[in-house]
Image (cartoon, grey):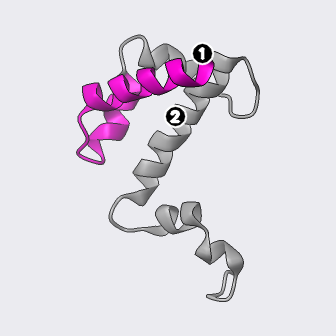
Amino acid sequence: MLSTEDPAIESHHFTQLIDPTGGVWFAAIERYALDCISVSKGTKQYTDNGEALEDLYGTREILARLCAMTDLDVEAVASGMVRLIRRKTA
């Protein structure tokens, strides 16, 4: 059981995951982006075997579901991710 003295409680990602205002969905979008970048760079650090990247450049169905949970515009998020991937892989 985690206590308030546990260093994990202080971590940014853990705080987002337990945030009742939707932090878990922002963390899921972050993971989606990391999966896209990892596959684009050909690394295996974060990988979903290309599912997120295929979704990003395809129907964006997965990303749309994640964005719906956070009230984010899927096209704006996708556009930002594509720009980020281009910078990270250039």
Residue 71 point in image, percent of width and height:
23, 45
Disc 1 residue type (three-letter): Ala
Q: Does residue 89 show up?
A: yes
Mark 2, residue position: 32
Report the quarter where the C terminus lies: top right
Residue 58 covered by magenta stretch: no
Q: CA distance from mark 1 to mark 2?
A: 20 Å
Please, what is the dominant secondary structure of the magenta stretch? helix
Residue 64 covered by magenta stretch: yes
Question: In the rendered image, which quarter is residue 67 located in?
Answer: top left
Residue shown at the point (50%, 62%) measured from the top left = 17
Q: Earlier in the sequence, mark 1 or mark 2?
A: 2
Mark 1 against mark 2, which lies toward the viewer? 1
- SS state under label 1: loop
Image check: 15 left or right of 64?
A: right
Q: Rate crowding at label 2 as few (under 14), some (14 to 19) or many (20 or more) other CA atoms within 10 Å.
A: many
Residue shown at the point (43%, 12%) measured from the top left = 57
Q: Rate crowding at label 1 as few (under 14), some (14 to 19) or many (20 or more) other CA atoms within 10 Å.
A: few
Question: Would you place residue 55 above or below residue 76 in this image?
Answer: above
Q: Which labelled disc corresponds to residue 90?
A: 1
Could you say which is closer to the camera, residue 44 or residue 24?
44
Residue 85 point in image, percent of width and height:
52, 22
Residue shown at the point (45%, 41%) measured from the top left = 29
Disc 2 residue type (three-letter): Tyr
Magenta stretch, residue numbers: 61-90
Residue 74 point in image, percent of width and height:
28, 30
Report the quarter where the N terminus lies: bottom right
Residue shown at the point (67%, 81%) measured from the top left = 2
